[in-house]
Amino acid sequence: MKGSNLGELEELVLLVVAALYEEAYGIAVQDKIKRDCDRNIAISTVHKVLQRLREKGYLESHYGGATAQRGGRRKHLFQVTRSGQKVLSVMRDQRNRLWDSIPKIAFE
């Protein structure tokens, strides 16, 4: 799949959106990255990456309903597309092949 490689942050955000499934929106993505990866990423950066992934066709988005908890604002929710699933699968396979090719002695 030529041209489908993602940058590290793009891959991380795409994986987090997949993990959050139907609850993936900017703050939730930012929180999960902080919690699971111990990385602080500005919300503006998260939004830029989400938009870039949507433009590449790896994410689709829609707005959820407004809630009083959010001051009447709606969440901009994201989901991984089939193309996004495919690129993640390709990248996982590439990484696994590389890990599997490391001789055991290399880590002794």
Image (cartoon, rainbow, N blue to C red):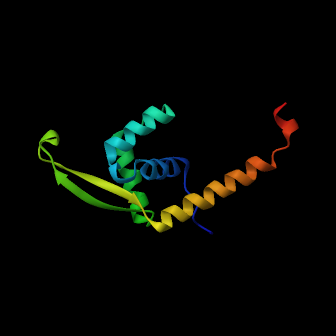
Query: Which of the 4 quarters of the picture holds residue 93?
Result: bottom right
The residue at 63%/54% (across/down) is 92
> Which sits in the foreground, 21 or 12?
21
Count of numbered circles in the view: 0
Quadrant location, the C terminus: top right
x then y, percent, for residue 89: 59, 60
x then y, percent, for residue 66: 15, 51
x then y, percent, for residue 46: 38, 46
Query: Which of the 4 quarters of the picture holds residue 91?
Result: bottom right
Q: Is residue 63 left or right of residue 1?
A: left
x then y, percent, for residue 71: 12, 42
The residue at 51%/62% (across/down) is 85
Q: Is residue 62 left or right of residue 68?
A: right
**As displayed, is residue 63 above or below residue 31?**
below
The residue at 70%/51% (across/down) is 96
Quadrant location, the N terminus: bottom right
> Which sits in the foreground, 11 or 22?
22
**As displayed, is residue 13 above or below residue 32?**
below
The residue at 45%/38% (across/down) is 33
